[in-house]
């Protein structure tokens, strides 16, 4: 398993940490945590977590759509930063790549 950061931003409104976890079976997930005031305003709590999960088959579809580029490179170069998860979901929806989303509010 390999884990790497996709986003870490902290300012007066946002305290966001997002990272990817590449698994040995070819699947991967992206986990984000927002502890900022934006989460408080939107969800009435200062702890919002979310996960995007891709099976090995779904990850393979993403890699093939980038002509076989390395998955870590795809994620870091195209889907990192504060808008990274939105870019990823938009790209996957446009290219019919399935993923699972889950969120929790604490």
Image (cartoon, helix red, strand yellow):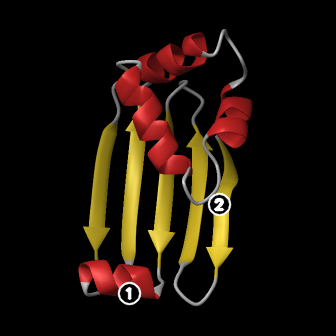
Residue at (40, 45) in percent of width and height: 52
Q: CA distance from mark 2 to mark 1?
A: 18 Å
Q: Secondary structure at mark 2?
A: strand
Q: Quick one: 47 or 87, which is closer to the camera?
A: 87
Q: Quick one: 33 or 1, which is closer to the camera?
A: 33
Question: Dot 1 corresponds to which residue?
Answer: 46
Q: Quick one: 90 or 19, which is closer to the camera?
A: 90
Residue at (49, 61) in percent of width and height: 32
Q: Secondary structure at mark 1?
A: loop
- Position of the C terminus, as image quadrant, is bottom left
| Image spot of residue 14 (x, y percent) | 54, 79
| Image spot of residue 86 (x, y percent) | 45, 47
| Image spot of residue 65 (x, y percent) | 55, 13
Residue 106 visible, this angle: no
**Circle nearer the N terminus (2, 1):** 2
Question: Dot 2 corresponds to which residue?
Answer: 7
Judged left or right of residue 35, residue 73 is right
| Image spot of residue 100 (x, y percent) | 31, 39
Residue at (29, 60) in percent of width and height: 103
Q: Quick one: 30 or 88, which is closer to the camera?
A: 88
Give the answer, above or below, for where 82 lies relative to 41: above
- Position of the N terminus, as image quadrant, is top right
Circle 2 residues within 10 Å: few <14, some 14–19, many ≥20: many
């Amino acid at each position: 398993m390999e884990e790497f950061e996709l986003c870490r931003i902290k300012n007066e409104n946002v305290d966001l940490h997002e990272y990817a976890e590449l698994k040995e079976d070819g699947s991967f997930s992206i986990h984000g945590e927002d502890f900022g005031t934006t989460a408080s305003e939107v969800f009435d709590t200062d702890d919002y977590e979310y996960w995007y999960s891709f099976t090995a088959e779904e990850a393979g579809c993403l890699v093939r759509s980038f002509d076989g580029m390395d998955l870590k490179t795809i994620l870091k170069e195209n889907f990192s930063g504060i808008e990274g998860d939105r870019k990823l979901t938009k790209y996957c929806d446009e290219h019919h790549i399935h993923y699972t989303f889950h969120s929790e509010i604490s």
